[in-house]
Amino acid sequence: MTETTEPDVTIDSRDATCPGPLMDLIGRVKTLEPGTVVELQTTERNSTTDVPEWLEEAGHDLLGIDERDDHWNIYVEVN
Amino acid sequence: MHRIAIVGAGTGGTVLANRLAEELQTEIEAGDVEVRLITADPEHVYKPMFLYVPFGKKTVEDAKRPVEELIDRRVTLSIGRVIDVDTDRKKLSFADSSVLAYDQLVLATGATLEPEAVPGLAEGGHHFYGPDGAERLRDELAEFTEGHLVLSVVGVPHMCPAAPVEFVLMVDDWLRERGLREDVDLTYTYPINRAHGLESIADWATDLFERRDIALETFFNVEEIDPDDEVIGTVEGNELEYDLLVAIPPHAGSDLVTDAGLGEDGWVDVDRNTLEATNAEDVYAVGDVADVPTSKAGSVAHYEAGVVADRLASRVRGQTPTATYDGKTVCFLEAGMSEATFIEFTYGEEPFVREPSKPLHWAKLGYNESYWLTARGLL
Ligand SMILES: Cc1cc2nc3c(=O)[nH]c(=O)nc-3n(C[C@H](O)[C@H](O)[C@H](O)COP(=O)(O)OP(=O)(O)OC[C@H]3O[C@@H](n4cnc5c(N)ncnc54)[C@H](O)[C@@H]3O)c2cc1C
């Protein structure tokens, strides 16, 4: 994923501790149409493994993970 | 006169009012300060008692005392529901149309249960998170002699992250004591990839579940319940049949908070150390309604109340407040009907789970009895 990707929905879960970011994502994904691209912002390192694992389980696509100065952006496409 | 208004007379609000009455005794008696505790419910409700109601060990009445009996005589008590907070004009509006001005405001309105947020949950599921739910579950459990009992954590965050694990360990023990465990299958479900948000509790619980034949389902996010066919459907596309569903319902903060622009989903955005609201001046939050990265627990409400009392007292005296909250959280966890363990941690720390013991179970029951002294600010 490159910095030019424009997500349809951004979820700012920075400063939330585990499992906050994943739960924020799950809560939102439930309400979104297939094809929606989501950017999840997290400062929790565990999210970089928990989120891909959940996407696999729930059948959504991981588009990529960008490491920023103080957080990660995880890009997801809803199926 | 300096007016301090506290909305909510649960654990956080009551401890705070009593602490302030003590710290500002002289100023209150001189008529320079007013500490006003406002609550919609004239009864103070100690929710941890509800965990014992389904097993017939406590009653809902054991969990209630009139707020009036718990507060210092220097605290002014107002019974009424606040329906609007105006942080620019520093005014509270009440359901009976009256209005109250404040100089400093503390929100301690707790969390509310929202079973309606999940289709079929209110009809198909039981819970022990409120008085009526706990009593209905007691009646249902008393009649439950065989089948599949599912404890499902539906809503996260929820009050007392330990309670679902405690419930399933207690029901296991309780069914064994009554000679029914052979005829009942037990399953515990959790939304993420392990049994609990805190890793050490997840490890501890997973090990105990294995030893006690409690099935564990993870990545289990409930989407809907079919109450007629008794089936749970998940966001992940799985289904689980049940005969008795005990769910931890989704929680929400307060509409007051969202409407006042103090935070999303009804939780107040605060500085996690000073507990001052991010989006308004002279507003604080304590207890479950404050959005801080630790458990929604009575112990948290209690420690936060101590910090806010110190900060408010400093303000009143024209001093710079220095007291801060470090995330201290303390929790007793029942491991069955006669053993418990204990954890303690601060922000970012992973707790250590001690081996469960009988003395810790007695300590938890003892704490519950002495809670009424805690609320009075005496412990
Ligand atoms: C089953 C169960 C077991 C638990 N076990 C434990 C445990 O073992 N240990 C532990 O530490 N914690 C435990 N907890 C959690 C603990 O009970 C809560 O974290 C605690 O009560 C939070 O205190 P509070 O002051 O924030 O809110 P509450 O105690 O919920 O009080 C909220 C107050 O606000 C009032 N209010 C709300 N809205 C308004 C309004 N608009 N106007 C006026 N008044 C209003 C209410 O009437 C109430 O007085 C448990 C909870 C449950 C449900």
Image (tube, rainbow, N blue to C red):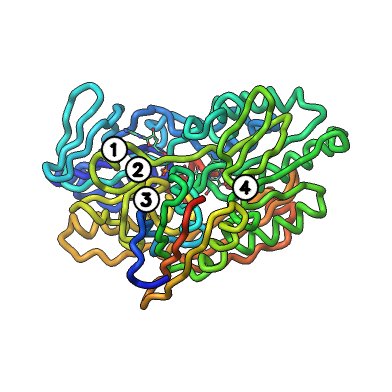
Label 3 beta carbon less than 8 Å to ligand 1? yes
User: What chain does badge 3 belong to?
Assistant: B
Q: Are marks 2 and 3 on the same chain?
A: yes
Residue at the spot 43% in from the left edge and 29% down from the top edge: B43
Tags 1 and 3 touching, CB below 8 Å? no
Q: Which residue is mark 3?
A: B290
**In the rendered image, the vertical position of residue B97 relative to residue A36, given as above or below:** above
Q: Is residue A60 above or below residue A3?
A: above
Q: Which residue is mark 1?
A: B256
Q: In which image quadrant can residue B239 be found?
A: top right
- Residue B63 image position (x, y, % from top left): 54, 33
Is B195 situated left or right of B90 in this image?
right
Is the residue indicated by label 1 positioned so its CB lies within 8 Å of ligand 1? Answer: yes
- SS under mark 3: strand
Pointer 4: what residue?
Answer: B220
Q: What residue sits right under mark 2 in the picture? A: B266
Q: CA distance from mark 2 to mark 3?
A: 9 Å
